[in-house]
Image (spheres, rainbow, N blue to C red):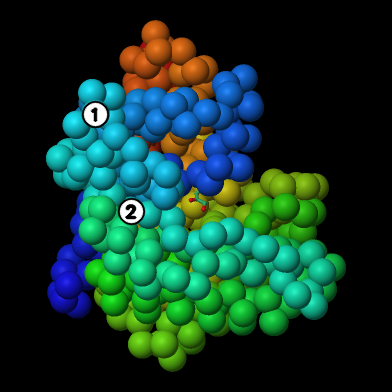
């Protein structure tokens, strides 16, 4: 794998009008999602649900890549002939893999987390590449609270993200680096901006120190938002402006794209925020795109409800959200499109 190939994959993931579907929920997270629709989280139910997502007709018009979980990367579509990574690649969708093993308590920092998964990562990345993955994801969790985030938490997570990114590139996988500043709390938008700026500055310092090739990487950040419990919500324009301002300060132009997480925003709000950023007059050095989990899947999960006979309606719901986010990639989304698309 050459540097050129890594850069090509990174660019393909943020191709015009397209973004990423995050379908890499760990065992615990998918169980929570299934609980919300009253479906038991068995291996077969997880497989059937992921197959539904990956066989949505036309999704490849707007979806460039899908992030998978270890179990899903090894699963096969009904009929037994198409392993999921090949099923996706056949549609021109790039398969990716979540490679961290989760956020655990950070020693000496009550309430803060460090993401684990570096042990054995080189070998796992080699196996994932052989199974068809061409990009990877590692998520760090940064919490805002009393005395948080600490510089210790930010630095420890930035160091781990860079160690992961260097190993992923060596194995031919484009690393998506995800330092997620959580929405939990009643803080205002300024505190989220400060924490995001600190996390991104530390991250790019470490990526540089650890010789990561930025052209072959992508950033998956949170948007700059007030805490979920904050008294007054921010307008769409405020969020877009605050987010772009922080990113312009911190993210080098060599990075081909920024693919936002949705992080608990509703599906329509996540689309509106992305749209507002892409509709700004200022040209940005990187593509501004999406790598949504909940904001793409929520209506699909609801429509499916665990019943095979709802598969078509569930696929329609995914196609529709993907199309609306595809429009937001150009700044061409509007609230009326929600009504049209629902009709
Ligand atoms: P959400 O869009 O649901 O936040 O998930 C994206 C993701 O991959 C978080 O790691």
Of the numbered discs in the image, which one, if any, rests on residue 246?
Answer: none
Please say if 237 is above or below 156.
above
Q: Nearer the viewer, residue 169 or 27?
A: 27
Classify mark 2: helix, strand or loop: strand
In the shown orientation, is residue 190 left or right of residue 126? right
- In percent of the image, x 58 and y 59: which residue is there? 102
Residue 214 visible? The answer is: yes
Which residue is depicted at the point 72% across and 71% down? 106
Label whose residue precedes the other's in the sequence (1 or 2): 1
Q: Which residue is mark 1?
A: 80
> Quadrant where the N terminus lies?
bottom left
Who is closer to the viewer here, 16 or 237?
16
| Quadrant where the image shows the C terminus | top left
Mark 1: which secondary structure? loop
**Quadrant of residue 181 in the image?**
bottom right
* Residue at the top extreme, as displayed: 309
Which residue corresponds to the image point at 77% horizontal and 71% vertical from the top-left? 148
183 is higher (above) or lower (below) than 147: above
Residue that lies at the very extreme toward the right in this rendered image:
146
Instruction: Please give the residue where the numbered disc 2 appears in the rendered image.
Output: 96
């Amino acid at each position: 794998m050459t540097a050129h190939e890594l850069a090509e994959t990174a660019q393909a993931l943020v191709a015009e009008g397209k973004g990423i579907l995050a379908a890499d929920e760990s065992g615990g997270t998918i169980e929570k999602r299934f609980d919300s629709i009253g479906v038991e989280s068995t291996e077969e139910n997880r497989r059937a649900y992921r197959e539904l997502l990956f066989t949505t007709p036309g999704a490849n018009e707007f979806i460039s890549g899908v992030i998978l979980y270890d179990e899903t990367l090894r699963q096969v579509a009904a009929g037994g002939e198409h392993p999921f990574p090949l099923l996706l690649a056949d549609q021109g969708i790039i398969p990716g893999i979540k490679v961290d093993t989760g956020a655990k308590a950070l020693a000496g920092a009550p309430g803060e987390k460090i993401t684990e998964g570096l042990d054995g990562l080189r070998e796992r990345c080699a196996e994932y590449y052989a199974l068809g993955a061409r990009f990877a994801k590692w998520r760090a969790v940064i919490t805002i609270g009393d005395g948080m985030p600490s510089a210790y938490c930010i630095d420890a997570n930035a160091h781990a993200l860079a160690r992961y990114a260097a190993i992923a590139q060596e194995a031919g996988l484009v690393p998506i680096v995800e330092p997620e500043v959580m929405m939990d709390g009643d803080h205002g938008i300024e505190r989220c901006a400060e924490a995001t700026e600190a996390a991104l500055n530390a991250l790019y310092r470490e990526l540089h120190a650890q010789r990561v090739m930025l052209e072959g990487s992508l950033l998956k950040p949170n948007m700059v938002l007030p805490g979920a419990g904050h008294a007054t919500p921010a307008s769409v324009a405020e969020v877009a402006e605050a987010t772009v301002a922080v990113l312009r300060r911190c993210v080098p132009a060599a990075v081909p794209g920024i693919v936002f997480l949705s992080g608990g925003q509703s599906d329509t709000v996540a689309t509106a925020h992305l749209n507002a950023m892409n509709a700004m007059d200022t040209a940005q050095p990187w593509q501004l795109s999406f790598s949504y989990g909940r904001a793409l899947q929520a209506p699909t999960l609801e429509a499916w409800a665990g019943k095979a006979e709802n598969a078509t309606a569930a696929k329609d719901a995914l196609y529709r959200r993907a199309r609306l986010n595809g429009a937001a990639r150009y700044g061409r989304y509007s609230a009326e499109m929600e009504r049209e698309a629902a009709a």
